[in-house]
Amino acid sequence: MPNEKSVSLPVRRIAIVGSGLSGLTAAILLQQQGHKVVVFEKSRGPGGRLAAKRVPGGSADIGAQYFTARNPDFLPFLRHYAGDSTFAPWQGEFGFRSVTGQWSPFPEEHRYVGTPRMTAITRALSHHLDVVPETRVKRFSRHGEQWTLYDTEDSSLGSFDQIILTAPPAQSRDLLMDSGLEAEAVMLEDYVAGILPCWAVAAHFNETPWEHHQGMRVEHPVLYWLANNSSKPDRKDEGEWWVLHADPAWSQSHVDTPPEQVAALLVEAFRDLVGFAEDPGEVIAHRWLYARSACDAQPGHLWFDEQQIGLAGDWLSGGRVEGAFDSASQLVQAMPSGA
Ligand SMILES: Cc1cc2nc3c(=O)[nH]c(=O)nc-3n(C[C@H](O)[C@H](O)[C@H](O)COP(=O)(O)OP(=O)(O)OC[C@H]3O[C@@H](n4cnc5c(N)ncnc54)[C@H](O)[C@@H]3O)c2cc1C
């Protein structure tokens, strides 16, 4: 169980931009301290890159594929706030294929997934919170000690004592810039450059295209990661849904290629790699403009004390699901209101 403490300082109104895992974690921890928290999310639902797309017969995880739990606080947090039934270990064979075609196993480690889809976790977390969906925060301006947030129509979203940004670095930088915080915005440039796009494709096959692994990281000019989504716990698909992620450099050079063309290229590369002739039935493609961070600097979080603005997100702490949790937890610890 996370360390629950009640607030001994004045109650603050805190706005959180983004309802991915880092935004939801920060919101829950701050609310637990007694603060009034509102989470603004530009999309229809919470989750961010912990994402699933509805497909015939179920859903396919098109963003994060699995997560680790090396931080001893992570699983207790999820169990307490999302519930045991929203995630489970993904058992299977995981292999790395080198450029020369040599296979080696992944290190022994517990790998977890949301059940029956990745978004089950973030949806359950969001039930504890005031999340305002379909609301893109465009800018904020200071009036005395308070910040007023505005949406894209320039309508006020309310006044707050503190703001936490959990959007990917390019979007956080633009928000700071549009709010006149140029010096803080410029500090994010290295992070912006360090995050690359990723094309994701989900393809349905009637037969098993490859039975030796459930998840594969491959060194390949087109492909990066291949997973049998139907092998994850609590999926009840007929046939198999496979998720194919393109190589980051390939994704970058095909960022404007039409989705149908990308889907065809990825499926062709996959069938070539595993030696499988069947055409998939359904195929869907999704482009992530900001996928995984490859930035060397990992400060954990950023806190601008004079402005009372904090930043959290995977890109500040390892670039993974667990990093999003770590970053948000560290920021909350570091905020004056969390002392
Ligand atoms: C293809 C892919 C594969 C991945 N595979 C793995 C994996 O296997 N294992 C792993 O651990 N990690 C993986 N990751 C990374 C993992 O998904 C992220 O580390 C994690 O989900 C990031 O969470 P976050 O809360 O920091 O950011 P996000 O999930 O990106 O959340 C940010 C939220 O902010 C919202 N937002 C942005 N701007 C605004 C605005 N102006 N106003 C309101 N809302 C806004 C967005 O809509 C989003 O919901 C993968 C990511 C991708 C894309």
Image (cartoon, grey):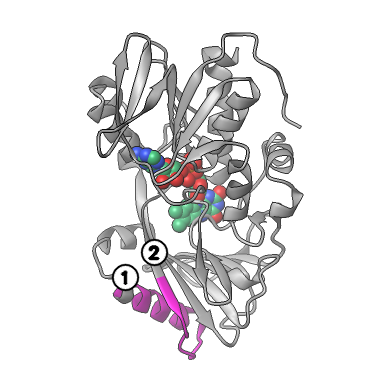
Disc nearer the start of the sequence (1/2):
1
Magenta part of the chain:
261-284
User: Are the residues flagged by discs 1 and 2 in contact, CB closer than 8 Å?
Assistant: yes
- Tell me the tag on residue 46: none
Q: Which residue lies under the disc numbered 1? A: 259
Q: Is residue 176 visible?
A: yes
Depth order, front residue of 2/17: 17
How packed mark 1 is, by other alpha carbons closer than 10 Å (few <14, some 14-19, many 20 or more), is: some
- Residue 180: x and y in percent read 23, 22
Which residue is drawn at the image coordinates 53% and 73% (left, top)? 242
Quadrant of residue 164 in the image?
A: top left
How packed mark 2 is, by other alpha carbons closer than 10 Å (few <14, some 14-19, many 20 or more), is: some
- For residue 148, above or below residue 143: below
Which residue is drawn at the image coordinates 47% and 48% (left, top)? 48
Q: Which residue lies under the disc numbered 2? A: 286
Secondary structure beneath label 2: strand
For this view, does 194 lie left or right of residue 16? left
Which residue is drawn at the image coordinates 35% and 50% (left, top)? 196
- For residue 292, above or below residue 73: below
Quadrant occupied by the N terminus: top right
